[in-house]
Image (tube, helix red, strand yellow):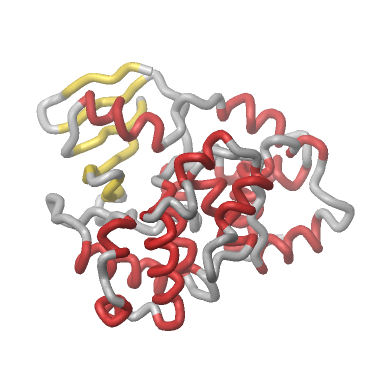
Amino acid sequence: MFVKNAENHVEITECEKFNLDVTLDCGQAFRWRQNDDFSWTGVVKGVETTVAETPDGYRFYGITAQQFTDVFFDYFDFGRDYGQIVKTLQEDKHLAKAIDRYGIIRILNQDPWETLCSFIISACNNIPRIKGIIERLCENFGDKTATSYSFPSAEKIADLCISDLEIIRAGYRVPYIMSAARMVTDKEVALDSLFSLSVEECEKELMKINGVGKKVADCTILFGTGHIEAFPVDRHIRRICDALYPDGLPCCTKGLEGIAQQYMFHLQRMGEP
């Protein structure tokens, strides 16, 4: 990978290409918005950028090369060899079809607190409404960026009252958000420890929080801690497993279940199989 500062952007070349649209809009993150020119704008760890695909790689606007290295290299999981991963997953005919159609879908390494809070909000919800609730949360309690807001910290939310959060219109999820924020702030749930625990240990830690079941826990683990073997199951995944894998996932997904899950989820969203 070659990274250089240009006049108003950072130019990324000699890198493994991936499907930017699907990666940013396949239900693993909720704060990216697509612009009229097909670029995407989002805020990661308080840093706002607009990313666009080019024939040779990607352009990141509004940041420096150092910010790309410090924040976005890890966020987009550029250090992982997805070329080899998709070759392995293509041993299964259904995943091979998805990979041929959609290319590489990367797992985004998000902030664990933002991921946890976002997937609490996602429970029994649809993506447009999830995005709206999260945007109101950020607008009211985050810090201003160039055109948006950062995600508010657990400490900021923990200092609020339930009535303060009524403005985000999250309904019954508000007490769960508040409980999670206070338990994270008080270290009753140690998010930093999740990176070194097994998936099962992570689930046990996260499910201490009222309102966090296995699916929310597994989404937090997969998208917030780098455990690509985590396999969140919702109605979409259950439906496609019943249709394609009634006897269990194929052997080629071992250790890569979370990446396979993204292809399965996107197939189901697109009305397949």
Give whichever of 123, 239 is nearer the camera.
123
Q: Residue furthest right?
A: 247
Quarter of the picture containing the C terminus is: bottom right
Q: Is residue 122 above or below residue 55?
A: below
Which residue shows up at 12% across the image and 32% down it? Answer: 8
The number of callouts visible is 0
Residue 55 is situated, as x and y percent measured from the top left of the image, at 35, 30
The x, y position of residue 73, in whole percent, is 37, 29
From what the image shows, is residue 99 above or below residue 210? Answer: above
- Give percent across and percent down for residue 259: 61, 42
Q: Residue at x 17, y 55 (%)?
A: 143
Report x, y in % for residue 21.
42, 48
Quadrant housing the N terminus: top left
Q: Quadrant of residue 154?
A: bottom left
**Is residue 28 at all visible to an observer of this figure?**
yes
Q: From the viewer's side, name the closer residue of 75 and 197.
A: 197
Left or right? Give the position of 132 relative to 209.
left
Which residue is at 15% across, 51% downward?
145
Residue 185: name its quadrant: bottom left
Q: Taking 45 as reference, is 250 left or right?
A: right
What residue is drawn where x is 66% and y is 50%?
A: 231
The residue nearer to you, when weighing 68 against 181, is 181
Q: Can residue 54 be spotted in the picture?
A: no
Answer left or right for 171 relative to 143: right
